[in-house]
Image: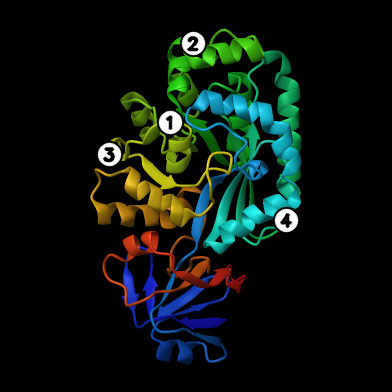
Amino acid sequence: MKIITPEYILTPTELKKGLSVAFDQHIKAIDTLENLRRQFPQAEQISCETNSLLMPGLINAHVHLEFSANKTSLHYGDFVPWLHSVIEHRDDLMDSCDTACMQQAVAMMLDSGITTFGAVSSHGLDLEVAANAPQNVVFFNELIGSQANMADALFNDFLARLDASKVVARQGFYPAVAIHSPYSVHPILIKKALQLARNESLRLSAHFMESHSERTWLDSSEGAFKAFFQTLLQQSHALCSANEFLELFRNTPALMTHVVHADACELEQLSKDHHTVIHCPVSNRLLGGGTLDLNALEAHRVDWITATDGLSSNYTLNLFEEMKAALFLHADAALLPLANRLLESVTINAAKALHLNSGAIALGKDADMLLLQLDEAPSEQIALHLILQRYNVNAIFIHGTKVK
């Protein structure tokens, strides 16, 4: 048992002063130091400096570790040219992203206060790194493949990777399922994977409506994707519409990543089935996807959280940087409410979306916490200042253990 006494606590929805936190793997009590000393007389006491702030660890729900070697190899500006560049450079990028490369990506996240991440794994090459990461990991084994004649082989490969992730037996590691997208996975495969996820209560993720090209292809089998699919896969039409894709997920909540080009009917369906949208603003900007309409999401009561995506479409895996990008990208939004909402989107709301017992400094929650050193006493604009300033992270706790 430990007792930590910061000057301030951000829960993250409330700013509190004059309280201490008693914790082991979980937060056991929040009270005055005097009361906690009486309640836990043998506890180790952790003192903090003036203007110290205790807050929940950050949660990055969507990242691709396997492409962490990219810096300048890929073509930015529009989705389809970027996709062609991924295919062109895929082998070189994956060959150059060895264990050390992926460990650097994990360390980048930890240094910026990320105590949990969702690893979307296309090939399983990141399994060992994710299994040994200090953070909690939701390991999304990704299913991809649109050719019916390859369905059995593709699904068997997916099952083998999923089974390998199930062998990992450590606290805070969760095998999960990802469906790549409606344009890249055959409906037969989607149905089989979703049934497996339902049967085993596995967390689910998918990319959905990331680009204008995807919108046009799914609606009319036309646009920039047409030449791409005809040339590479000899496929002349989309395998399903956006609505048909969502219908497969009926009553099966999932994390839907991007959703920049969803229409009102699709947003209504996302809301009815309790899906959560993952907002990746930097990735959307670099790949020419446009800007997610947060007002439309909230009008349809669709929950949303924020993540970085991978280094194939970002320059960093730092969630504070991602929130800063979102703060300026959504220039029409009221500043402080957006800052508060962004901070919640990488803590308490991200934990809810991933079905995790973390994301808040609250009784019974996992003791995944950050201790920051502020320059001065915080105000009601603390969320905004956390996003804009680079405050030192003095300590990081995961399940109550100091990892940094």
Query: Label 4 vs label 3: CA separation?
Result: 41 Å
Choose the circle earlier in sequence order: 4 or 3: 4
Query: Label 2 vs label 3: CA separation?
Result: 29 Å
Kindly indicate the quadrant of the structure image that contains residue 401. bottom right
Q: How would you rate the neighbour count of disc 2 (Cα within 10 Å): few for under 14, some for 14-19, many for 20 or more? A: many
Whether residue 81 is situated above or below residue 41 in the rendered picture: above
Q: Mark 4 sits on what residue?
A: 169
Q: Mark 1 sits on what residue?
A: 289
Q: Nearer the viewer, mark 1 or mark 3?
A: 1
Query: Label 1 vs label 3: CA separation?
Result: 17 Å
Q: What kind of element bears circle 2? A: loop
Q: Quick one: quadrant of the C terminus?
A: bottom right
Hey, what amino acid is under mark 4? Ala
Can residue 130 be seen here?
Answer: no
Whether residue 201 is situated above or below residue 351 in the rendered picture: above
Q: Mark 3 sits on what residue?
A: 295
Q: Mark 2 sits on what residue?
A: 221
Hey, what amino acid is under mark 1? Gly
Q: Residue at x 43, y 37 (%)?
A: 285
Relative image position of residue 226 (x, y in whole percent): 53, 12
Hey, what amino acid is under mark 2? Ser
Q: Are marks 2 and 1 in contact (CB under 8 Å)?
A: no
Q: Residue at x 58, y 20 (%)?
A: 187
Q: How would you rate the neighbour count of disc 4 (Cα within 10 Å): few for under 14, some for 14-19, many for 20 or more? A: few
Q: How would you rate the neighbour count of disc 3 (Cα within 10 Å): few for under 14, some for 14-19, many for 20 or more? A: few
